[in-house]
Amino acid sequence: MELSPTRQKLYTIIFGTGTPAGKRFDMVLIYLIAISVLAMILESVSVIEGRYGVWLNAVEWGFTGIFTLEYLVRIYCSPHPLRYMRSFYGLVDLLAILPSYLGLFLAGMNYLLIIRLLRVLRIFRILKLVRYLSEANILMRAMVMSRRKILIFFSAVLVLSTIFGSLMFLVEGPENGFTSIPKSIYWTIVTITTVGYGDITPQTVIGQFIAAAAMLTGYSIIAVPTGILTAELATEMQRERTSRRCEDCHSSGHESDALYCRYCGTPLSD
């Protein structure tokens, strides 16, 4: 789709980050998002809300107007508006402004809890920050790449939890709080994750032996997802360094925030 010069310029500034204007736009937007989320958090404090509620409400509507304008301009200058609106960031941008407008139509006394929920949903604005942080994008890619390994790991933990839970139900029984296998599985998960609420505890010697085995199992496997994610994160960071090549000596391996080539000193392009 061919864009007019005005739309092309807006698209370069709003969607692009490789130009000075685009970087300034992103930085301004980051500050606005952070301040709006801070205002929402302060508004939840009853003392602050009672004293500065009018000002905080005015600030909120000011941010809502700014983010609404930003959303409309993104639709206007996007080469594929519907594709943007259905994308993850398009939905996040919509969620950032929708709760405030929905609150206007739910002003009845019976809907006060719903309005409170909608106001809290403004926290989705913080997701808008992700697109402007390259490190966050690397982390998200690492999480996506490791999703299958982590899914297999959690499946193995679920199998172990079912085995330990069934044994505890058999050994301890309802008289010691293990009234069902699902509740026993709940106890196992709490024990393996080293949370240990203490609402259910084994009383028999065999039950305590099984509990000790579950605790040791938890300590031995709790670092597994961290190792999986760390390995994928290292891979993504290495890929990010490799993608940055010096135009003069064609060397790679530069950090994402490096300004000059580590080998010849030539300024690096974005």
Image (tube, rainbow, N blue to C red):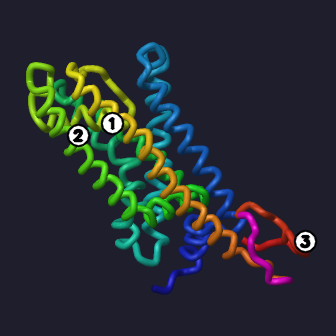
Q: In the image, which is nearer the foreground, mark 3 or mark 1?
A: 1
Which of marks 1 and 2 precedes in the sequence? 2
Residue 72 visible in the displayed image: yes
Residue at far right of view: 264
Point 34% across, 67% down: residue: 86
| Magenta span main SS | loop
Label 2 sits on a secondary structure element that is helix
Specify the amino acid type for callout 3: Gly
The magenta segment is 249-255
Q: Are marks 2 and 1 in contact (CB under 8 Å)?
A: yes
Q: Quadrant of residue 188?
A: top left
Q: Is the residue 1 above or below the residue 44 in the image?
A: below
Residue hosting label 3: 265
Identify which residue, 174 or 26, lies in the foreground.
Answer: 174
Say which mark, if any, is on residue 30.
none
Determine the residue positioned at 85% across, 83% down.
249
Of residue 53 and residue 15, the one placed in the foreground of this image is: 15
Q: Amino acid at mark 1?
A: Ala
C-alpha span from label 3 to label 1: 57 Å
Distance of label 2 from label 1 (alpha carbons): 9 Å
- The quarter of the rendered structure image containing the C terminus is bottom right
Disc on the earlier residue, 3 or 2 = 2
The quarter in which the N terminus is drawn is: bottom left
- Label 3 CA crowd tier, 10 Å (few <14, some 14–19, many 20+): few
Label annotation for residue 164: 2
Quick check: marks 3 and 1 in contact, CB under 8 Å?
no
Q: What crowding class fits label 1: few (fewer than 14 Cα within 10 Å), some (14-19), or many (20 or more)?
A: few
Q: Residue 231: x, y in percent?
A: 55, 61
Label 1 belongs to which residue? 213
How far across and how far down the image is residue 264, in percent?
91, 75
Hey, what amino acid is under mark 2? Answer: Phe
